[in-house]
Amino acid sequence: MTVDTVLRLSKVVKSFGAVKALRGVDLDVKAGEVHALLGENGAGKSTLMNIAAGALGADSGTIEIGGTTLDKAAPGLARELGISVVYQHTSVIDDLTVAENMLYSVPDAHRQAQGDMRKWVLDQLAFIGRGIDPSRKVLELSAAERQMVEISRALAQKPKVLVLDEPTEPLTHAETETLFENIARITAMGTAVVYISHRLPDVKRVADRLTILRDGETRGTYEIGSISEAEILKLIIGRPIESAFPQKAALAPGVMPLIQTKKLSSAMLQDVNFDAKPGEIVGLAGIEGNGQREFIRTLAGLEGASGDLKVEGHTVALGKADAAQKAGIVYLPGDRHAEGLFYGQSIRENLSMLVLPDISNKGFVSRNKESELAAREIEALAIKSASMESDVGSLSGGNQQKVLFGRSLARQPKVLLADEPTRGVDAGARVELYRYLRELANAGAAVVVLSSDAVELQGLCDRVVIFSRGRIIRTLAGAEITEENITGAAITSDATRDPAQLQSDTGRFQKLATSDSFPTAILLGLIALLGVYTAGINEFFLSERSVGGILFLASALAFIGMGQLIVLLTGGIDLSVGPVAGLTVVILSFFVGDGTGSADLILGLFVAFSAAAFIGLMNGLLIRSLGINAVITTLSTFIAIEGVMLLLRPIPGGYYRYELIDALSVRLGPLPVSFIIAVLVAIVCEVILRKTRYGIGLRAIGSNPTAAHRIGAKVDRNIVLAYVLCSVFAAIGGLLLAAQVGVGDPNVGKNYTLASISAVILGGASIFGGRGSFLGALAAVILIEEIAAATGFLGLSTAWQYWLPGLLILIAAGAYSKSQTSSVTHRA
């Protein structure tokens, strides 16, 4: 390895089953250079960089970073050696704040002391010219902001090599220019940049050298000035390409519009008058956030508006996707991962999704017709796959996009709305997708294309309309359609009304809705209201005895709920917590009867807690090592523990000594000591969750385990530890439960599984992981026990003990889903 070579990959081989992704690839990157890595989707670019970053292990070959060999797949070690990666699908964690994302993945040596963390984060963001509030959750950020946070995080690690995988895909023209300026600054400081992109003009502009991969093999490394775009395309695709864009069609004069809007208005649109004729491709352009995306989604019926929308002269109801589809409008979404394809389903099933009525008889899908349709689209679009039954997620990005095209074309649209139709698609696939769009237009459809790529709009479209502040400010046609005119019209517009205020209002609401502390405040308010109301009906409800009883009963559930929350934060669930608590009660009943002493109690506690830890360990290992679903694993454990308890205590027996019960029931005024301890533990756990590396890593794993692994989280180890801690907390709850029942009853813990899940969801936890609050769970436990007590004081039936918590859970889950939906809409 020469002095100025900072990354060397030699003879790297990687296979996924029978598919050989890399076949002995070589790559040398020098300090201070921008080295472009090109190739079609599936050529092996991202796989190669994942291996260099330690996220994947190579089957064979050598990886050297800064002269040191990376001898195992370990992202943390690769970062320490000097490589940082900004992935195409960002690895910033949605449920963490900007600051938490930055701090978790950057070693202490590369940042300042604890007290200066906020300033340090702001300094890193300022380096790339972005003013983002470090306390904002990534969930609330736009795609461009997420990308910039990831770039800032990568640069903060002071890397020798910075890998940028499709960095300009989510960026506007102005943001792309800022990125290029930053790349120049980075390389001037001696950092090497590996630049992966499908955009050849960008590559020609920023790269010093380029390496081309095809079919997992190196096709050559070249100085950027020594090779033309045509030669690059030939090496990438394996054949020459005469032109990237198909020839535009000449429209006959006097053709009536196929789709037309008049005075279309909404929160982001102002009196938009638009039309597209059959045979025409019309582009939508403008700086992101100026209404063009809202406009195309409004045409698709995905967003509401006022005004008129007509197809072939017939009025189409606004805000109704089914009405748009019936009128012949088909929407091709810009994000195939979030809104497009159905991952986990086959290519065949994805291709037929929009035409199920046409291939069904009395509600039953004809498999023959579906297969014929799939075969036809696969052949027409040259989709490369082993079989139409292959999972669509197994395809390369370009072929996934072709499936999305095929599904849309199978509907035979009168109007096709294509939102960023070539995002994340390689050069060869782009050429084919352009041809499909032009062929559809030539067949008589109107095609509306939203694209952030001015070159794409110039080469593809017959007309381009530019949006600014919710209005169409200019329409380009013929020779006027140039990259300069498209970009210039957008950035020099003086149209009135700035949508930023609307977005900031949404941001403030979103920040409140996604706050982890918000559910806790709501629950405390409900606890107070229910207490005051019930005391107004029955004055004894808030007596010292009543309050003490409620809090004592809450203590056991509080510990079981906190254990459940630890697992839920990782994206898992533990159905065995109730039986674990019950097993603790049963085991202790053999050691704490009359005639036993302190040594027996200590032995009993050791046996009970050891059994709980072992159960948690087995749950974690089965889930992570064998890949068994968490529900199946812990349900099986639930049943097994129930059987063990019945063997130990077929009927309740083994009464506890009164001295032990009294010790566990001691109070300070109306407050049981056990409850005070539960509050203190909840506070400590909350601090750990928010302020320590383990807690942040736990939330990162639950939010996105793949991304968490990329930034150095020990995913398997932490998840296994979470299940162990969950069972130990359940055992603590079982100890307090023993003081409540006073006998070894094998049936005592059954209801606590559902109760613990109810508590953590009421407390604001997401069942998908990454979000939750120990204080929220504790508040929810108090409310559940308060409801149970209040029903008696109010003379209500015990059914209310189930109805009220159930209703609250639905409200809580609905509020969380709404906040998530609002976040996605806000980001779009």
Image: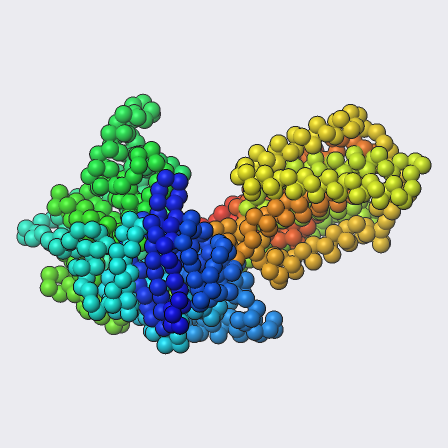
Residue at coordinates 21% horizontally, 37% vertically from top-left?
A: 379
Residue at coordinates 56% horizontally, 42% vertically from top-left?
A: 624
Residue 287: x, y in percent? Answer: 30, 65
Residue at coordinates 22% horizontally, 41% vertically from top-left?
A: 382
Residue 338: x, y in percent? Answer: 39, 48
Along the viewing direction, whichever of 775 and 8 lies nearer the viewer:
8
The quarter of the rendered structure image containing the C terminus is bottom left
Residue 458 is drawn in which quadrant? bottom left
| Left/right of residue 412 with respect to residue 537 in the rendered view | left
Q: Residue furthest left?
A: 253
Residue at coordinates 81% horizontally, 33% vertically from top-left?
A: 744
Along the viewing direction, whichever of 45 and 700 lies nearer the viewer:
45
Residue 296: x, y in percent? Answer: 28, 52
Whether residue 674 is visible to the viewer of this picture, yes or no, is yes
Q: Residue furthest top?
A: 362
Q: Residue furthest front?
A: 1
Image height of 812 relative to 386, above or below? below
Residue 699: x, y in percent? Answer: 56, 54
The quarter of the rendered structure image containing the N terminus is bottom left
Scheme of colours in the image = rainbow
Along the viewing direction, whichever of 540 and 237 lies nearer the viewer:
237
Residue 347 is drawn in which quadrant? top left
Q: How many marks?
A: 0
| Left/right of residue 390 with respect to residue 121 in the rendered view | left
Residue 206 is drawn in which quadrant? bottom left
Whether residue 507 is visible to the viewer of this picture, yes or no, is no
